[in-house]
Image (cartoon, rainbow, N blue to C red):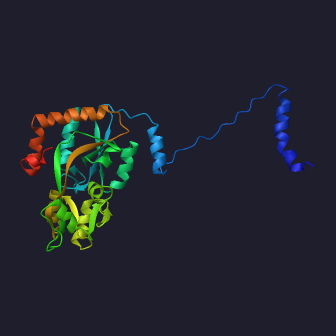
Amino acid sequence: MIKKGFLLSCLPLILLLCACDNQEVELVFQKKQPQISTESNKESISGVEASKPLITLTATDTVEILVRQDGAPGMYLGSDGILRGFYVDLERMVMEEMGQVYHFVPYSDVGPLLHGLKTGVYHIALAAPDLPDYRSFLNLSIPYEVLHFVTFVQKGNSFISGSTREALLTSLHGKKVGVQTQGHIYQVLREIREIELVEYPTTTKALEDLNKGLLDAVPDVKRIGIYYSSLHNWDIVPAGEPIISQEITTAFSQMLEESLIERYNKALKTLLADGRFDTLYESYFGPMADEDRP
């Protein structure tokens, strides 16, 4: 037996069909379009992004450039809210040579910026080392500098040292070593299971904990460690030989069409050839040594 409630619910549809005087009625049902969540996992993101056309940026489009805000004297955010440093000034010169519109985006945590580069939200990141893991998801410019990463320890520490890289790494066995999350030091040391890696948003924050005695060592660029040690009166010093030496480049999102990096490399080569790069470098660090040139 058909329930009375069901008949009443069908009554509007019956009246509509009768009113059409036997004419055909087309019923259209619009499906709700699925939305892509920005919180989806890495596999979903990579699949979605891979299907998108590459981003083309002309000279009049704004290039979003990531700048580490606690990497002095290379790049840092001043107390007045202005980004400064060698890499910042170099990037301004490159953008001017390109005639490119740009915008600097300061960051203090490497985690979110990697996602932004992978998805094309950000376009460029300054001072990226040339490492295989980075090349897997980034395009890199021509190199323009070699940086040497030394190991900082507390003053008076005689357990961590070494006249060779191998000896220094051995002295780190069983020690707590501060590294930047997914950074270049992390990439180099992660396979050495005898070393306990403690991850930080940036190595500068790790150096602060080293000074407090919460870590045994922090590998970093020598000039960065010395700068912040002097600034904050930290009792830390570099020890032993460089742990790694890396060619430094500028990183580009692989979501970008190649014309931007081609224009960038052309401008950078011009600055290197006409001496403007050397003049800028010397104003910060003195004459560049041969061992610091790619």
Q: Nearer the viewer, residue 8 or 232?
A: 232
Image: 148 above or below 172 = above
Quadrant of res 52: top left
Residue 101 percent location from the top left of the image: 28, 36
Determine the residue positioned at 32% across, 37% down. 62
The reply to whether residue 75 is in sight is yes
Q: Nearer the viewer, residue 79 or 193?
A: 193
Q: Nearer the viewer, residue 187 or 286?
A: 187
Quadrant of res 261: top left
The reply to whether residue 151 is in sight is no
Residue 60 percent location from the top left of the image: 31, 32
Determine the residue positioned at 85% across, 41% down. 11
Residue 3 percent location from the top left of the image: 89, 50
The quarter of the picture where the C terminus appears is top left
In the displayed orientation, state which residue is furthest to the right: 1
Image: 133 above or below 219 = above
Determine the residue positioned at 31% across, 44% down. 135
Determine the residue positioned at 26% across, 57% down. 185
Residue 234 percent location from the top left of the image: 17, 69
Horizontal side of residue 237 vs 8, given as left or right: left
Horizontal side of residue 140 vs 168, given as left or right: right
Horizontal side of residue 208 vs 18, given as left or right: left
Q: Nearer the viewer, residue 42 or 111?
A: 42
Image: 211 above or below 3 = below
How many numbered marks does the figure carry? 0
Horizontal side of residue 66 vs 92, given as left or right: right
